[in-house]
């Protein structure tokens, strides 16, 4: 298996036929490697004929769930402990953190992946890239963005999870061309820069992680609109997870995230595990290619999105992934209504005066019970008509508790490396 990845390896601009041909080769190499080296896939793929398959035939193979990875974690490792170069853990936002092991080759693959994403988002070797996400705490995303910037030839500024004042000081003195961070934080940072009169004209690219800035129709969410007002046409969405060691970044067309063609095959599956056509929502399922530490086959991420298959103006020939609509585990069932937390979150993002918020969900298998906790930098729930606006969007009346900004920040950022606004207290999920 490959251990070094370079810019010229990218096949995303080849013809669709050539991409499929190369992906088919890489897929079969990946399946053979997984069967030979992973105890888990030796078992689950034991009945698979020892012959090459097509990409269409991939759908006949069993899927791998997050629960499988958690229950049989050690069995997924395909190398000796001596060959492991890095160990990280998933963020645990929807369950217990899970151990993921990377080899040196996987680390270089990670850097190559994010280098391609930075290029797609218009970042060049001449840029300085300010990282507002942590690189420590066994968090692979920070390492990926740092490694990608370095591999590109850009200068990485690892300021991590720090104060608005700290980031503003760096922007004033170093004048970075790009920032990587969570959109809600970037919106607050942009507002702070405006209010303090700090020149941020050097910034031409925001790489947005962890929160969607576009909706199902590919329009801007309220959070995206806030970014658009501060940094017009500067921000790019990206999607990734620790398990798949791959990210999908928007290009200049801003019409979906491109998977690097030589690093991943993406499917969207319905509730029965059957692939759905482009445009239809379902569970994002990824087979990450050329991974050696913990290879995965048809990994179900638990995230809901859709594929975009029309040609992209940037010239890449791969299908793209749309915005994340929600997480399968976070789907709400309330009084006969089924919806995702984003229905509440986008509404709160649109209310001027709301500074932060989170949701707690209780109840049993029959119906969920939702409570919203909201802090304000001006006004209050009554004067801002929060209950009315939430009802207009969801057709549900939910309790709204006013809390301090300090309490909101402590709850949202207290136990995770990225903001957590959904807290699942349902009995059937304990």
Image (cartoon, rainbow, N blue to C red):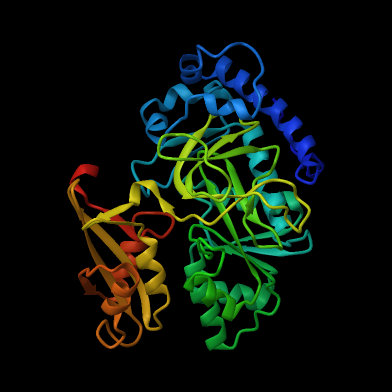
Left or right, 159 with reference to 419? right
Residue 113 on image: x %, y %: 67, 45
Q: Quadrant of the N terminus?
A: top right
Front one among 410 and 390: 390
Q: Is residue 147 visible?
A: yes
Number of marks drawn: 0
- In the image, residue 287 above or below residue 214: above
User: Taking 245 as reference, is 249 above or below it?
Assistant: below
- Residue at left offset 46%, top offset 20%: 40
Direction from residue 270 to residue 57 in the image, left or right? right
Q: Residue at x 68, y 44 (%)?
A: 260
Where is residue 122, by image quadrant? bottom right
The answer to whether one can see residue 89 in this image is no
Q: Residue at x 46, y 41 (%)?
A: 301
Where in the figure is residue 17, as x and y percent of width and height? 78, 36
Query: Could you tell me which residue is drawn at 70 percent across and 50 percent down?
Result: 115
Give the vertical position of 75 relative to 133 (above or below). Answer: above
On the rendered image, what quadrant is the C terminus found in?
top left
Q: Position of residue 157 (x, y in %)?
A: 63, 62
Name the foreground residue: 106 vs 382: 382
Q: Position of residue 349 (x, y in %)?
A: 42, 73
In this view, the residue in front, 341 or 208, is 341
């Amino acid at each position: 298996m490959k251990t070094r990845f370079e810019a010229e390896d990218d096949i995303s601009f080849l013809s669709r036929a050539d991409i499929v041909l190369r992906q088919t080769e890489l897929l079969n190499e990946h399946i053979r490697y997984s069967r030979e080296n992973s105890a888990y896939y030796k078992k689950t793929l034991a009945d698979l004929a020892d012959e090459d398959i097509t990409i269409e035939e991939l759908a006949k193979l069993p899927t791998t769930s997050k629960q499988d990875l958690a229950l049989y974690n050690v069995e997924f490792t395909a190398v000796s402990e001596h060959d492991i170069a890095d160990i990280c853990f998933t963020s645990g936002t929807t369950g217990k953190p899970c151990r993921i092991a990377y080899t040196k080759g996987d680390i270089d693959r990670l850097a190559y992946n994010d280098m391609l994403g930075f290029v797609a988002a218009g970042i060049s070797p001449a840029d300085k890239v300010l990282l507002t996400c942590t690189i420590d705490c066994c968090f692979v995303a920070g390492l990926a963005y740092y490694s990608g910037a370095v591999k590109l030839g850009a200068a990485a500024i690892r300021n991590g999870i720090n104060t608005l004042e700290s980031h503003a000081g760096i922007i004033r003195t170093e004048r970075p061309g790009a920032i990587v961070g969570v959109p809600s934080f970037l919106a607050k940072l942009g507002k702070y820069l405006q209010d303090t009169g700090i020149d941020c004209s050097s910034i031409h690219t925001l790489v947005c992680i962890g929160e969607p800035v576009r909706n199902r129709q590919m329009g801007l969410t309220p959070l995206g609109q806030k970014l658009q007002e501060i940094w017009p046409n500067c921000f790019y969405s990206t999607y990734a997870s620790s398990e798949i060691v791959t990210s999908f970044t928007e290009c200049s067309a801003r019409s979906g995230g491109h998977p690097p063609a030589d690093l991943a095959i993406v499917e969207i599956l319905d509730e029965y595990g059957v692939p759905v056509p482009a445009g239809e929502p379902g569970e994002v399922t990824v087979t990450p290619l050329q991974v050696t530490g913990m290879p995965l086959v048809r990994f179900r991420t638990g995230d809901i999105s859709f594929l975009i298959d029309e040609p992209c103006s940037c010239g890449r020939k791969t299908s793209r992934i749309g915005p994340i609509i929600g997480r399968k585990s976070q789907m709400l069932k309330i009084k006969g209504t089924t919806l995702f937390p984003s229905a509440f979150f986008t509404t709160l993002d649109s209310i001027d005066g709301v500074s932060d918020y989170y949701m707690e969900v209780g109840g049993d298998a029959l119906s969920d019970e939702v409570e919203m906790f909201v802090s304000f930098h001006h006004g209050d729930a009554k004067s801002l008509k929060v209950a009315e606006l939430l009802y207009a969007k969801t057709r549900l009346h939910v309790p709204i508790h006013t809390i301090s900004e300090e309490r909101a920040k402590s709850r949202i950022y207290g136990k995770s490396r990225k903001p957590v606004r959904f807290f699942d207290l349902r009995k059937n999920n304990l």
